[in-house]
């Protein structure tokens, strides 16, 4: 007999591995033992505290949060390959791990494509993402694009 408000024992099975509770949901897209709350599509990179603050300011300036801006940059990078064509932008570089920026694409294939793209650059996904975020800090591509778009919209009123 099932009590009201309790989850069915078939839906979740809990294990203890170290101090992290892990769960297996009956969802074929999730792997056994995946940490609760983790997102398999996340793509992230580490920045310094100062870089993280600048990235956050850029995102807020165009009305986005850090994750949304990061996701747009990842999608754009996969489309145009700007890091691959810019030899002045070092992909692999040591950095103090103070601020993690995470893109959260909704399509699984974007992470697979980003992993392959990073590999083609001879870099890890984290290092490639961090270089991409630093490139946006230096160039402010989206801010400039939104500024131009805003000017075009204003001129048509």
Image (spheres, rainbow, N blue to C red):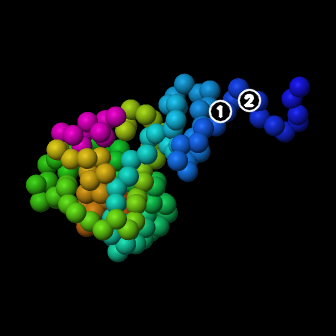
Q: Which residue is nearer to you in this view: 62 or 28?
A: 28
| Distance (Cα) linking label 2 and label 1 | 7 Å
For image coordinates 16% across by 59% down, the residue present is: 89
Query: What x and y, as percent, mark residue 74?
Result: 34, 47
Image spot of residue 61 (x, y percent): 44, 68
- Circles 2 and 1: CB atoms closer than 8 Å: yes
In which quadrant of the rendered view does residue 78 lie?
A: top left
Name the residue: 40% across, 65% down. Answer: 99
Compared to residue 134, the image places residue 27 above or below, namely above
> What is the magenta range?
112-120
> Which of the labelled discs sits on residue 9, or is there none?
2
Tell whether position 115 is magenta: yes
Q: Is residue 36 left or right of residue 147?
A: right
The disc at residue 28 is none
Q: Residue at x 17, y 44 (%)?
A: 121
Residue 85 position in % (x across, y down): 14, 49
- Would you identify the image quadrant in which residue 87 lies? bottom left
Main SS, magenta region, reads: helix
**Kind of element beneath mark 1:** strand
The quarter in which the N terminus is drawn is: top right
Q: How crowded is mark 1: few (under 14 residues within 10 Å), some or many (20 or more)?
A: few
Image height check: is 89 above or below 7? below
């Amino acid at each position: 007999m099932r009590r009201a408000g309790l989850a069915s024992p078939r839906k979740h099975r809990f294990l203890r591995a170290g101090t992290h509770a892990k769960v297996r949901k009956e969802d074929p897209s999730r792997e056994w033992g995946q940490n609760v709350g983790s997102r398999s599509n996340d793509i992230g990179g580490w920045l310094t505290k100062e870089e993280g603050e600048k990235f956050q300011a850029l995102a807020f300036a165009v009305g986005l949060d850090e994750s949304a801006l990061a996701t747009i940059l990842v999608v754009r990078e996969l489309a145009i390959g700007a890091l691959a064509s810019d030899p002045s932008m070092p992909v692999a570089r040591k950095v103090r791990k103070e601020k993690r920026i995470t893109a959260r694409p909704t399509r699984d294939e974007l992470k697979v494509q980003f992993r392959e793209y990073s590999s083609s650059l001879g870099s890890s996904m984290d290092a490639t993402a961090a270089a991409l975020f630093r490139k946006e800090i230096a160039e402010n591509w989206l801010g400039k694009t939104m500024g131009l778009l805003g000017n075009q919209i204003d001129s048509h009123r």
